[in-house]
Each structure stands twice: as C-alpha cells, then as structure tokens.
C-alpha cells in the first residue's frame, strides 16, 4: 500500500506529516483577519480548505493580495489628497494626521473588498 504522506518517527511510532512543509507559509496580518472571518462566517469553506491542506496557501495568497492593495491605496490616496514629503517637512503633525486618515481609509477598503468578502 503506497501513501502520499511523509512520516516522522516519534519513539517507536511513525506519525504522518499532514501539513506539507512546501506550503507552510507564514501568514501575516491580513491573512489572519481573513482566517478569523472564515472561521466565524464560512465554516464549511474554512474546514474544506483545512482538510484539503490548502488553507495555508489560500491565506498566504489573500495576505499578499491584501498587502499589495493596501500599499497601493496608501500611495494613491496620498497622491490624490496632495500629501507630500514637503508637507512632512513643513508640518509634521498635520502630515501624521493625514497619513493616519489615509491608512484608515485604505484599511477599510481592503477589509470590504478582500478580507470580509
């Protein structure tokens, strides 16, 4: 009987390696948020991905897409609203306030379009 699993010896017993090390990506902020959303709102999808061994790579892809979208939105919103490095030099507190507002806007857009969708 041939199996697709690798095994790790633990004492006299061999334990199957159920999680592939090839797809064991580190999941960041956005992937963790989406994971919690799936666990609470889409349990069937969450457990299907988990049992098929695809959850980690799925969350990794979500994390990458969300991070890229967030970074692009920060740049685009700052440019659109005229928040420049010169403003940072001239009035640092105003620049911080404006960038915090932009970060909040970008975060809400990513949440609505990727994380909670």
Image (tube, rainbow, N blue to C red):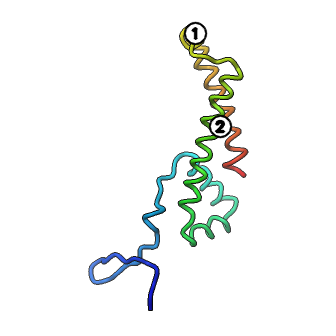
Residue 41 falls in image quadrant: bottom right
Query: In the image, is 116 to the left or to the right of 30?
Result: right
The residue carrying pointer 2 sits among few (fewer than 14), some (14 to 19) or many (20 or more) residues within 10 Å by Cα, namely: many
Residue 15 x/y as whole percent: 38, 78
Q: Where residue 7 sits: x, y (%)?
A: 37, 77
Q: Residue at x 46, y 73 (%)?
A: 18
- Which residue lies at the image location 57% right of the left edge and 63% below the top edge? 55
Residue 73, compared with residue 114, is above or below; it is: above
- The location of residue 91, given as percent across then percent down, is 58, 9
Mark identifier at residue 91? 1
Q: Position of residue 56 (x, y in %)?
A: 53, 60
Q: Residue furthest top?
A: 90
Residue at left offset 69%, top offset 32%: 105
Sequence order check, earlier mark of 1 and 2: 1
Q: Which residue is mark 2?
A: 107
Farthest bottom residue? Answer: 1
- Circle 1 crowding by C-alpha within 10 Å: few under 14, some 14–19, many from 20: few
Q: Is residue 25 left or right of residue 8?
A: right
Name the image quarter holding residue 67. top right
Secondary structure category for the residue under label 2: helix
- The residue at 58%/11% (across/down) is 86
């Amino acid at each position: 009987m041939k199996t697709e699993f690798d095994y790790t010896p633990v004492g006299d017993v061999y334990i199957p390696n159920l999680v592939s090390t090839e797809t064991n990506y580190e999941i960041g902020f956005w992937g963790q948020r989406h994971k919690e959303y799936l666990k609470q709102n889409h349990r069937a999808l969450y457990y299907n991905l988990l049992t098929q061994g695809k959850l980690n790579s799925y969350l990794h892809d979500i994390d990458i897409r969300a991070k890229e979208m967030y970074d692009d939105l920060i740049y685009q919103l700052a440019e659109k609203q005229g928040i420049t490095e010169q403003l940072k030099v001239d009035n640092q507190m105003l620049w911080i306030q404006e960038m915090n507002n932009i970060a909040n806007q970008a975060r809400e857009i990513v949440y609505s379009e990727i994380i909670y969708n």
